[in-house]
Image: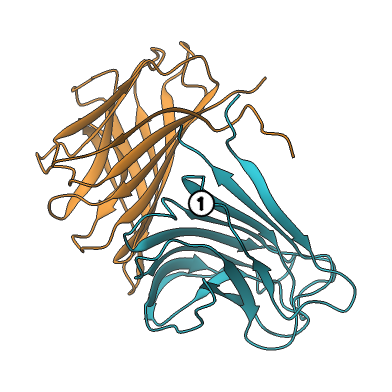
Amino acid sequence: MAAGSTYTPIATQTLGSATATVTFSSLGSYTDIVLIFNGTMSSAAQVMFRLNSDTGNNYSYTKLYGQGGAAGSARESNISGGVLGYYNGGSSPITQILHIQNFGNSNTYKTTISRSSDPGNIESSVSLWRNTSAITSISILNTGGVNIASGTTITLYGIAAA
Amino acid sequence: MANTYYLIASNTVGSGGASSVTFSSIPQTYTDLVLKSSVRSTSTDNWLNISFNGTSATVNWSARWIGGTGTAANSSSSTNSTYSVLENDSTTTASTFSNSEIYIPNYTSANAKSLSLDNVFENNATAAQSFLMASLWNNTAAITSMTLTPSSVNIAQYSTFYLYGIKNS
């Protein structure tokens, strides 16, 4: 099969030291964005994202999660970042996948979907950014100040509809 | 054009079924692996077990999942669990096959491997299932081969497996 024009790598960052925020700008002219997070945080924390460096309380999320007991669901409104998923604090790397469709449109609020696979906690989340601006940058962070750990790899891919 | 989402290999199960499916000699030139499967069992088995590099030992595996069967949601966990791909078992509606995706980032790294797994099957009846899973293979070896094996009997004819490589540069 010939290589396709989808899942084109835009940028990747492998952290050489603990870092508070990883930002991707210059997102290119794709239709959708997929972000892959593989690593850990410095301690148990919610892995979050901000779009266009917006630090306002313009985000909300709803999640379905399970930690091996009962399944649960949670949500927050009017917070300062969207959600990739919760890192439970273990030593093993976790895998998180964030999908942002039609990130370049300037007519609608942006809804994202994410999957977080932590050996101690599994989640599926939807986040909303209440802003109609086209997305020009994506930052990964914990809004409470927990660092992203050294060795973590974060990669951004673009998917073109045509 | 970048070689991303590149088809490494595929397997369509033929007449008589298959006792396992193996992808060997996985190139070490990609960053991530994605396995997309459509699977049915010839028995009441529901799951295929996964193993890497020909190592069938389950001691380094653990998993956690959330799921639903149409009534209540539930969550559970297991050590030594190599469940990976959900199958439509032989009691479900004929010609129905499950849909599964396994994402394995940094499969050549010297770290433990964290797998993200999405598994569903719909049945137009009870016994439909949907599972989101996290699995950990606590082994630092690069993944060079992958085998999917049912607990008993065979993977049914027309089941398909597609292994893709994704490159981040």
Q: Position of residue B152 (x, y in %)?
A: 68, 88
Front one among A121 and B150: B150
Front one among B166 and B136: B166
* Residue type indicated by callout 1: Gln
Q: Quadrant of the C terminus of chain A?
A: top right
Q: Quadrant of the N terminus of chain A?
A: top right
Residue at (29%, 57%) from the top-left corner? Answer: A93
Quarter of the figure with residue B36? bottom right
Indicate the chain on which mark 1 is placed.
Answer: B
Please determine whether, in this image, residue A97 is positioned above or below residue B58.
above
Front one among A98 and B109: B109
> Crowding at label 1, few (<14), some or many (≥20) Cα neighbours within 10 Å?
some
Residue at (18%, 43%) from the top-left corner? Answer: A148
Residue reaching furthest to the left: A145
Q: Colour of chain B?
A: cyan
What colour-coding does the image apply? by chain
Label 1 sits on residue: B28
Front one among A79 and A35: A35
Residue at (13%, 42%) from the top-left corner? Answer: A18
A91 with respect to B28 (left or right): left
Q: Position of residue B148 (x, y in %)?
A: 62, 73
A66 with respect to B150 (left or right): left
- Mark 1: which secondary structure? loop
Q: Colour of chain A?
A: orange
